[in-house]
Amino acid sequence: MNRRGFTLGAASALCFGILKPACAAASYPDRPLTFVVPYPPGGAADQFARPFAQALGDRLRQSVIVENRPGANGNIGSAYVAQRMPADGYALLLGSLSTLAINPHIYPSMGYSVLDDLQPVSLTHSMPNVLVVGADTPYRTLAQLIDAARRQPGKIEYGSAGIGNTMHMAAELFQLRASIKLLHVPYKGGPEALNDVLGGRIPMMFNNLPAIVPLVQAGKLRALAIADDKRSPLLPGVPTMREAGIADANSVVWNGILVRHGTPPALVAQLNAAMGAVLADPKFRKLLTSQGYDILSSTPEAFAALLRKDYAAMGDLVKRANIKME
């Protein structure tokens, strides 16, 4: 064998030996990626996922296909990635505070372990919850709603995307801080609950800012308070919870991308770099911030640290509010 043949042979052997992960990263991705959104089409998660998938695909020069797998407040789609998809960087999961930090304290069995079976890649965005009521309800201020709830404890209904969803948790925190009692009506997803508020079948709910902005602006909903420490430039006339008289009732939901645990670190790093470039792109940021998303970005380590912190904090809130699966 000549020197050139030996060199090529040695390189090939290394690719199938100790340097196999590095060689795989060099050719990654060589086929389409699946981006699992564990919520129904049409909601705030889906509204973010589709333009993000397009931009990430352009960056990776490979298709990124959004696949909605709703159910059990995100558990079904999350378990699909965590347990059934290979740890090869081709299956991405859109995770959220709700699915990853709240569900483990409510569901007896989720089909996977958040902390053991998933690898954080990058935070992508956050969005505050907003307390909205139907345009035909008599409530025009938060104080009016609270007064009505105190006169009718446990009678005024509110919808959510399901038990343990951040919409539900925002309402539970609001009730604790306002010393009132409302009646929870859980739905299979945010869009279904929102449709019933719009149709007058239930009077109110907390929902993610991007999902309600156009409806409030069109006069189809009335926003009473935003569960954040600052007003939204998209709804400048809507006060924060604190401004409306209820302190410490913030509900800001973070989201991020994860892959299955065991995905080679080189692929996680490559995905993180590509996602960071998308999230820093001015055109992408302008598109999403105009809809109410606060664009984030992070290292895998920072995302993992936030997840562990909120995992513990949400467990405490679930206990205090005595939230259980019905």
Image (cartoon, grey):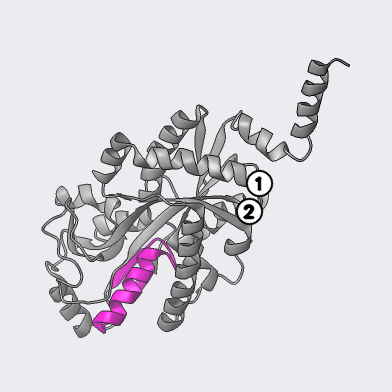
Amino acid type, mark 1: Ala
At x 30%, y 49%, the residue is: 293
**Residue 276, percent from left and from top:** 42, 42
Q: Is residue 183 visible?
A: no
Q: Earlier in the sequence, mark 2 or mark 1?
A: 1
In the image, residue 172 lies in the stretch drawn in magenta: yes
Asked which quadrant contains residue 166, the reply is bottom left
- Residue situated furthest right in the rendering: 1
Name the residue beneath numbered marker 1: 87
Name the residue beneath numbered marker 2: 261
At x 11%, y 66%, the residue is: 140
Left or right? Give the position of 16 relative to 112. Answer: right
Of 126 and 276, nearer the camera is: 276
Q: Is residue 268 above or below residue 302?
A: above
- Provide the secondary structure element on which disc 2 rests: loop
Mark 2: few, some, or many residues within 10 Å (few <14, many ≥20)? many
Q: Tell me the magenta residue range.
A: 157-184
At x 35%, y 55%, the residue is: 126
Q: Is residue 26 visible?
A: yes
Q: Does the residue at mark 2 contact the one at mark 1 (Cβ under 8 Å)?
A: yes
Q: Is residue 293 above or below residue 141?
A: above
**Residue 238, percent from left and from top:** 14, 61
Q: CA distance from mark 2 to mark 1?
A: 6 Å
**Residue 133, percent from left and from top:** 21, 63
